[in-house]
Image: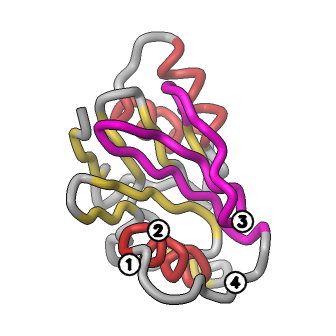
Amino acid sequence: MTTCAWDGKKLSADTRSVTGAVIDQSACQKIFQRKGVFCAAAGDLAEAISVVKYLLNKKGEPPDFEEGSFEIMLVSETRSEFYGGTLKPVPMEAPSAIGSGGSYAIAAMLCGKSAPNAVRIAAKMDSNTGVDFGVRTFRVR
């Protein structure tokens, strides 16, 4: 899966992706943004990306997707929401994290680490989180 972390100021994600049992050998983009609104995605990225595009653009009909196949954190200056495999937002407070390494990242942020450092710590514990190509981070607030 992945690890995406939100500490209230920064939104960060690892860069590992996996195809079957093979670790892909290039960086994977998991954070997308448009006009100051950022979405971080975990889970089935093929499903999540169509939902991210819909959330960032709000045009047309909602996409078809397999319910429960992704997690998305949407953050901006004025709002933060969690989408747990549906289009129904749940208000979200920092610190928050999603993905297979999310629990490790939240624990790290509760101990005072920033979102990028929390993702690095999660990568030490979660085999589906990788920072071989770095950690992508965006300052939101």
Q: What element carries label 4?
A: loop
Residue underneath mark 2:
55
Range of residues picked out in magenta:
68-96
Choose between 103 and 6: the one closer to the eye.
6
Quarter placement of the N terminus: bottom right
Q: Residues within 10 Å of mark 1 (few under 14, many from 20)?
A: few
Secondary element under disc 3, as helix, strand or loop, is loop
Badge nearest the viewer, 2 or 1: 2
Q: Which of the labelled discs sits on residue 25, or is there none?
A: 1
Mark 2 and mark 1 lie on one chain; the one further toward the N terminus is 1
Q: Which residue is drawn at 49% across and 26% down?
A: 94
Residue 51 lies left or right of residue 76; in this view the side is right
* Secondary structure state at the residue bearing disc 1: loop
Rendering coords of residue 99 (x, y %): 62, 52
Rounded to the nearest angstrom, the CA distance separating label 1 from label 4 is 27 Å
Q: Pick whichever of labels 1 and 3 is earlier in the sequence.
A: 1
The residue that disc 3 covers is 86
Position of residue 141 relative to residue 13, above or below, is above
Query: How far across and how far down the image is residue 72, in percent?
Result: 56, 57
Q: Which residue is drawn at 38% across and 27% down?
A: 8
Mark sitting earlier along the chain (1/4): 1
Which residue position is annotated with label 4?
A: 65
Left or right of 89 in this view: 105: left
Query: Residue 2 lies in what quarter of the image?
Result: bottom right
In the rendered image, the residue lying farthest to the top is 111
Q: Is residue 128 left or right of residue 75?
A: right
What kind of element bears circle 2? helix
Q: Is residue 82 above or below residue 111?
A: below
- Compute the Cα span from label 4 to label 2: 13 Å
The amino acid at mark 2 is: Leu
Instruction: Pick whichever, 69 or 21, lies toward us.
Output: 69
